[in-house]
Amino acid sequence: MKKTLKVLVIGIIMAMVFSGCTEAERVSYNLSQEADNFNVVRQLTVINCIEGDVLFQMTGKLSITADTGDNQLEIIVENEDGSYVKHFVGLSDNVTYVVEDLNLGANDVEKYKYTLNFNPDMWIPAEADIID
């Protein structure tokens, strides 16, 4: 009985040692959990790759999921009253995005506030006419 117990304990210890994950995997998992719990300030930048123009940026405590089936980003923001808002960003062959975790000054950002900045040249291509 003692011999069987020793073999079992040694087997469990070996399994734990050889099945461990790397530090990078643990850090990646922890950072993802923090972002999905709205604890990390992120900046999403959507870029038109053909022209090289920034279409818009969104900054705040955001949970972002890439839905490859629908070719879009799903962005969830928590409101102060405990409700949630979901935004969608459609992606195409010539539109890409970058998500940055902004740790500097993260404690100065309110949990329930976010900004969304559109590039007006992408939406309202207006030309001024001068009339005398």
Image (cartoon, rainbow, N blue to C red):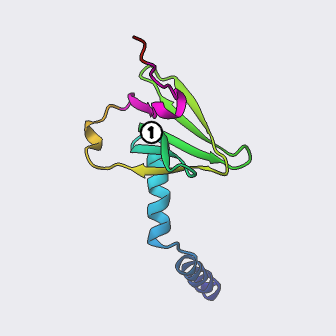
Q: Residues within 10 Å of mark 1 (few under 14, many from 20)?
A: some
Residue displayed at 50% across by 67% down: 25
Amino acid carrying mark 1 in the image: Gln
Q: Position of residue 26 (x, y in %)?
A: 47, 64
Q: Nearer the viewer, residue 54 or 32?
A: 54
Quarter of the picture holding the C terminus: top left
Q: Quadrant of residue 75?
A: top right
Does 79 appear in magenta?
no
Compared with 131, 97 (above or below) is below
Residue receiving disc 1: 57
Compared with 4, 115 (above or below) is above
Q: Nearer the viewer, residue 26 or 97?
A: 97
Tally of marks: 1
Residue most toward the bottom?
3
Start-end of magenta stretch: 111-129
Q: Nearer the viewer, residue 22 or 74?
A: 74
| Left or right for 110, reference 9 | left
Does 116 appear in magenta?
yes
Residue displayed at 40% across by 31% down: 115
Q: Nearer the viewer, residue 57 or 31?
A: 57
Q: Position of residue 35 (x, y in %)?
A: 45, 46
Q: Position of residue 104 (x, y in %)?
A: 27, 49
Q: Secondary structure at mark 1?
A: strand
Q: Quadrant of residue 38?
A: top left
Q: Position of residue 128 (x, y in %)?
A: 44, 22
| Left or right for 105, reference 49 | left
Residue displayed at 45% across by 39% down: 57
Quarter of the picture holding the N terminus: bottom right
Compared with 51, 13 (above or below) is below
